[in-house]
Image (spheres, helix red, strand yellow):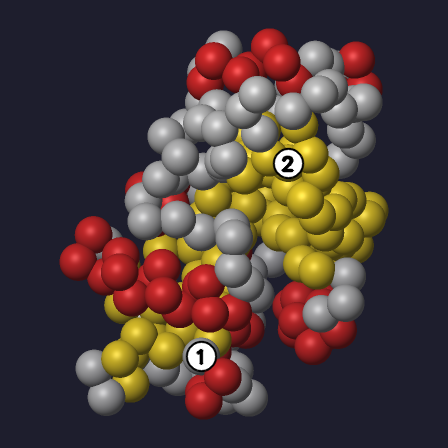
Amino acid sequence: MKRYPSSILQVMGCENPEQADLNDIKAIVTPGEHIYMVGTIPTLPEAWELKAAIECLQMVYTQTSYIELSARETIIELDAHDAPEMLELVNLIQPGFFYSDTYLLGRYIGIRKNNKLVALAGERLKMTGFTEISAVSTHPDYTGRGYARLLTAQIANKNIDQGNIPFLHVRSANERAIKVYDSLGFSEVRKIHFNQLSYLAN
């Protein structure tokens, strides 16, 4: 069994989720830790609890052309120096999916205004030929300026150039974000649940 450090990613996967025994991973999970299992979950054994089931849309960019960039903003590459601000901003907008070292999973870019990080987007899960765009976040004081659209397009275009297919997940109830992704050329593939599970030590 292998896992990312809890400061990077707390998403779990297995080959046959409906038949999985979550007790098999107790040795690598800290009591009280929240982890996410995507899609179908097995019957939960004693000491495991379902905390939340978040319905999302999985959307994929299946076109081969680059996304046209209309906005003109200075986009910066983000690194360890920016990590505290990244953590604060993402958890202000979509808490629970971004941790102190999540930025290590891929490329993250952002926009600063008045020396403050006000928008960012980056890469999370990667598989052969596919890259997940994640942590698309804009501070509430700066919405409506096209920042999410611009940053998403930048990340997508870079992956298209590398021969990867960009995909992303968005809460089903987030109609505003879905419209942005749809306008960029992303298409809905399916609905999927991010199930937040917690192991409660006996």
> Horizontally, is 162 left or right of 201 in the view?
left
Question: Is any part of residue 100 visible from this angle?
Answer: yes
Secondary structure under the numbered disc 2 in the rendered image? strand
Relative to 21, say whether 194 is above or below.
Answer: below
In this view of the protein, which residue sits in the foreground, 39 or 46? 46
| Residue type of the residue flagged with mark 1 | His
- Quadrant assignment, res 16: top right
In this picture, residue 23 sits left or right of residue 178? left
Which residue was labeled with disc 2? 197
Amino acid bearing label 2: Leu
In this rendering, is residue 12 above or below 180? above
The answer to whether residue 64 shows anywhere in this view is: no
Report the side of 107 relative to 11 (left or right): left
The residue carrying mark 1 is: 139
x and y percent of residue 36 in the render? Answer: 61, 37
At 54% across and 24% down in the image, what residue appears?
Answer: 201
Left or right: where does residue 175 sit relative to residue 103?
right
Residue for point 37% across, 30% down: 5
